[in-house]
Amino acid sequence: MVVGRASEDEVDRLFHALADATRRDIVARVLVAEYSVSGLAEQYDMSFAAVQKHVAVLERASLVSKEKRGREQIVRGQVDGVQRARRLLDDYERIWRQRVDQIADILAEDAEDED
C-alpha cells in the first residue's frame, strides 16, 4: 500500500532508517547542528565505520545529507525528509481514524436497530 505520493521503496527506506535508536539520535543531533562523521563517531560507543554505515542509511532515506569539506564529511539534517515522515504518519493516522469512524457508525446503527 502506497500512502501519499511516496513509493513503497521510499517508505521502506524511511521507516527502516528511523527504526534504529542510534540513527534517530543522529538525526536529532544533525537537525540542531552539523557534525563531521568523525565528530558523530565520538558521540557513540561504536566504530567510525559503524557510524558511517548509519549515516549512509540515513542519507539513502533523505533524512541527512553529506558534504565533503576538506578531508571531512559534514552531515546535516534534512528537514524535508523529516517532514515527509510526518506526512506519511499523518496519512496512516487518517486511515486509522476513518476505520474507527466506520466502526462507530456500525455500532450506532446496531444500537438503533435494537431500539
Image: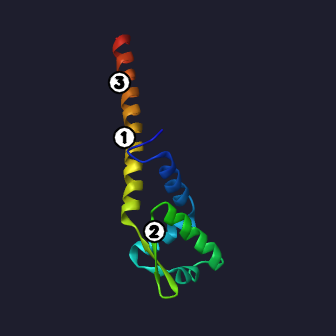
Tag 3 or tag 1, which sits nearer the N-term? 1
- The image position of residue 92, as x and y in percent, is 42, 43
Quarter of the image containing the C terminus?
top left
- Residue 85: give its label: none
- The image position of residue 65, as x and y in percent, is 45, 70
Going by the numbered disc 3, the residue's amino acid type is Asp
Q: What distance separates the C-alpha of mark 1 from that of mark 3?
A: 16 Å
**With 83 as the anchor, is 29 left or right in this view?**
right
Q: In this view, does 114 lie above or below 38?
A: above
**With 5 as the anchor, is 13 left or right in this view?**
right
* Residue at the image position 36 percent from the left and 11 percent from the top: 113
Tag 1 or tag 2, which sits nearer the N-term? 2
Residues 26 and 70: in front is 70
**Residue bearing the label numbered 1:** 94
Badge nearest the viewer, 2 or 1: 2
Residues 33 and 6: in front is 6
Callout 3: SS: helix
Residue 55: quadrant of the picture: bottom right
Q: Residue furthest bottom?
A: 70
Q: What distance separates the C-alpha of mark 2 from that of mark 1?
A: 27 Å
**With 72 as the anchor, is 82 left or right in this view?**
left
Callout 2: SS: strand
Going by the numbered disc 2, the residue's amino acid type is Val
**Residue bearing the label numbered 2:** 64
Tag 3 or tag 2, which sits nearer the N-term? 2
- Residue 105: give its label: 3
